[in-house]
Amino acid sequence: MLATVDCAGAVLAADVAAAKDAQASVASSSSHRIPAPTHYTDWPAVESRLATDPALEARVRKIVASMSLAQKIGQMTQAEIKSITPAEVPKFYVGSVLNGGGSWPDGNKHAGIAEWLALSDRYYDASMATDAAIKLPIIWGIDAVHGDNNVFGATLFPHNIGLGAAHDPALIEEIGAATARAVRATGVEWVFAPTLAVAQNARWGRTYESFSTDGPLVRAYARAYVAGLQGDFGDHHVMATAKHFIGDGATQNGTDQGNAMVSLHDMINVHGSGYFGALEAGVQSVMASYSSWDDVGTGTNYGKMSGARALLTGALKDKMGFDGFVVSDWNAIGQLPGCTNASCPQAINAGIDMVMVPDDWKAFIANTTRQVEHGEIPMARIDDAVSRIVRAKLRMGLFGTRPSQRAGAGDAGSLQSRELARRAVRESLVLLKNNRDVLPLKPGSKILVVGKNADSLPNQAGGWSSTWQGTGNSNADFPNGDTILAGLRHADGAANVTYSETAQGVDLKSFDAIVAVIGETPYAETMGDIMPSATLRHSDRYPEDLAVLQTVAKGNKPVVVVFMAGRPLYVNNLLNLSDAFVAAWLPGTEGAGVADVLFAGHSGEGPYNFSGTLAMPWPGVPCPDAGGSSAKATRWLFAPGYGLRYPSKHEVATLPTDPAVDACADASVLSVFHTLAVPPFSLYLADANPQHPAHDIGADLNAVIEWPSSHPVLRLRTVQVNTQQDAKSVTWLGAGRFFARSPQPRNLMQLVSTHAALQFDVVIATPAKGPVKVYMGCGQHCTTSVDLAHTFATYANGARHTVSIPLACFIKTGADNRRTDLSHVDVPFGVLASPPFSAAFADVKIVAGTAAGRADLPCASLGAP
Ligand code: BGC
Ligand code: BGC
């Protein structure tokens, strides 16, 4: 429910709701050619390489006919290993478990292959211990999205964005097969990969999980990846998942889990491409997307994909002929209107066959059982869902053998595919600039290596690496990898290589060349989104990378930049400070692949040349998605397909650097806190005295902060209000403040003139007895507030409300007759309260235009600042 708060703190408004030619073009699934673009006008029938097998279908029917309702609903349930013990499996007939990112046997990050296998056996044995007439083996799913990335010691391949640049479907099939072997060695049988998003906007925090902006390449890769993972369904293969169906890469502004605004034609022919490839290869599961879709051609709004019957059932199963099962994403059902994480007949009726209910699986089973008994979910739908799951399990050959008895189980060697990954790194590199042919480097030359990413396996690996976010890791968490620095030392001779992260105080004269390894640090999903108001300028987010280049540029030596990033970013200023510039994406554990190509194999292996080319356009302006005529002309600096080779004989001229652009101009939303504080804002805790120092809460999602530790005034934890870990729950133990602040003040007057509002989501846990002041700050002695205590008191505990306060309410006339100056706001959002009060806050932003017409409400009647 969206509540607009007027300046007197009252709730004013409520409620916001929230083919024939197909067959001809389907190539043989063993082919690795990149197909031509499609021009379908409706979802095509896709021919799977798996023929319908009457004997298999008879077995499926027999099994399903033998099952009770409890057994059927259990099969449709997938719980997280942290929330279900093996002993609970037989009682509820649970059909599947998963481990999420950063979840390992016994919570042990360094669990060995034997521990994974032992736990897999325990779940399997439990599934064989039911009282069912025909026992159905449980299936365990894992996010092995760039190798078996949750497992200690496994080789991590480059993330998909780097693989896209390789333009090599045969390589992808090998990586799929290697990943399958690694996963099966641990006793796990199903992977949630490949991601088939055709990412259109680099703001999206999952851009690196996408191969390309180009549909045909994604289609060829989908086919090859699924072929590699699923193979012939033998013991060395796993079930693959095509995800996230559909349009995850199409959302407006690249907002994770957002709304795709595209035509039916583009949804089919661009965003559907990967599904053609995956279905051709016989993929057995498809994961529904968190995102929603507005068909801009017909004006049809399909809502969130996990409830979109027209797509899950109509398009995917009926028209495209998918015969595997659809799994929902992590607690995704809870995002549908009228649903919770534990109850959603709509999703099942829409075509979800297996529900990922990580934690609330018991309540889900109870609710779904009741919904079937009351006819809210037809029995025929349940039977169809279960038939699909049983069919996939039969095809996978999971019946009859414990995980540890299957071929390849426990083979620690399967976790390592270092040569293959190193080759993938070499193929993924894209040379953007090589003026005066400063590359390749000569072995034996004296090299200074700088930059925070040079000696960092966590930064090389990115998100979905050991942990979900890829944060909280050190080099020791990747015991079998090589950093880029290690690779350079090996190729050049360790004595010739000096490393200094910042280059401060280093005498640059004694070196022949400088290699700067810079770039992004790890993130996953929503936490990686770059807000529409922010630029795509890398140095806005990582000023230290610009600083180190400025330092080494003073040496007048060739500067080679190796740029690690999960997306193409605006780097004109960094390109200008470099002689050579290599896009290295997120290369994974085999950093030695970088030195292979920088030295062109002169050190013995090789010879290697660059072969990668861009599979996504590279921006030449800080706001490539902002539109406007000036942006259009120079929007893309390098088009897809660009990539130099040795000898490059190509000069990249000095580039314009748009110094004045510090925000993307036509953004109508200024985000302050969206899962994480949105730079330049940080979140702070402080006592009630505005003169006192404040405590930066940092970015650790697992931290419980009691501040100050000696005599806490505030307690802060990360909780869920809308999506995973997107909210901060704050409990007032004394009088204190929770607020967002930026080092650079913002001018909000332009937004005031559009009738903008401060907006946030809130869930009240403990109502306040005294005032709850929501305030804005504009420097010393410049604070204005509105008291929301009365509004919050009307909110039911536990329910989410969206609060919207016109910015004009924060403009007040002070005792000195001066009006509050919103032209230099450093604190756009603060909450000052005293105990008792506890609430969770999410998605804090300033939204243009939402307070339309309310600007002259009697703001002056509000309590004193
Ligand atoms: C969990 C991870 C999981 C992720 C999925 C997070 O809330 O901590 O384990 O993989 O959600 O999005
Ligand atoms: C992600 C999926 C992933 C799942 C399980 C979700 O948050 O969107 O891609 O497979 O978590 O970890």
Image (cartoon, rainbow, N blue to C red):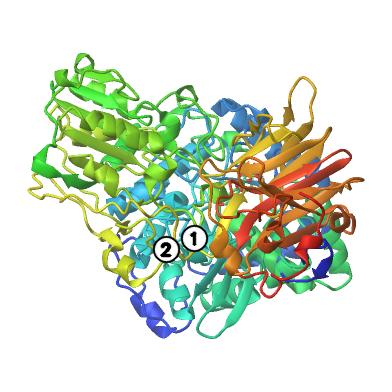
* Residue count near mark 1 (Cα–Cα under 10 Å), binned few <14, some 14–19, many ≥20: many
Proximity of marks 2 and 1: CB atoms separated by less than 8 Å? yes
The image quadrant of residue 102 is top right
* Element type where label 2 sits in the image: loop
Of the numbered discs 2 and 1, the one sitting upstream in the chain is: 2
Q: Amino acid at mark 1?
A: Gly
On the image, the x and y values in percent for residue 214 come to 35, 64
On the image, the x and y values in percent for residue 563 come to 31, 40
Q: Residue furthest top?
A: 495
Q: Amino acid at mark 2?
A: Gln
* Residue count near mark 2 (Cα–Cα under 10 Å), binned few <14, some 14–19, many ≥20: many
Q: Nearer the viewer, residue 159 or 639?
A: 639
The image quadrant of residue 501 is top left
Q: Quadrant of the N terminus?
A: bottom right
Q: Residue at x 86, y 56 (%)?
A: 366
On the image, the x and y values in percent for residue 362 come to 82, 49
80 left or right, relative to 222: right
462 left or right, relative to 779: left
* 14 to 649, vertically: above or below: below
Q: Residue furthest right?
A: 769
* Element type where label 1 sits in the image: helix
Task: Name the disc covering residue 200, or none.
Answer: 2
On the image, the x and y values in percent for residue 653 come to 15, 51
Q: Nearer the viewer, residue 139 or 717?
A: 717
* Residue 180 visible in the current orientation: yes
Q: Nearer the viewer, residue 107 or 582?
A: 582
Q: Which residue is disc 1 drawn over? A: 254
Q: Residue at x 73, y 25 (%)?
A: 708
In what quadrant does ligand 1 lie? top right
* Residue 85 visible in the current orientation: no
The image quadrant of residue 791 is bottom right
484 left or right, relative to 824: left
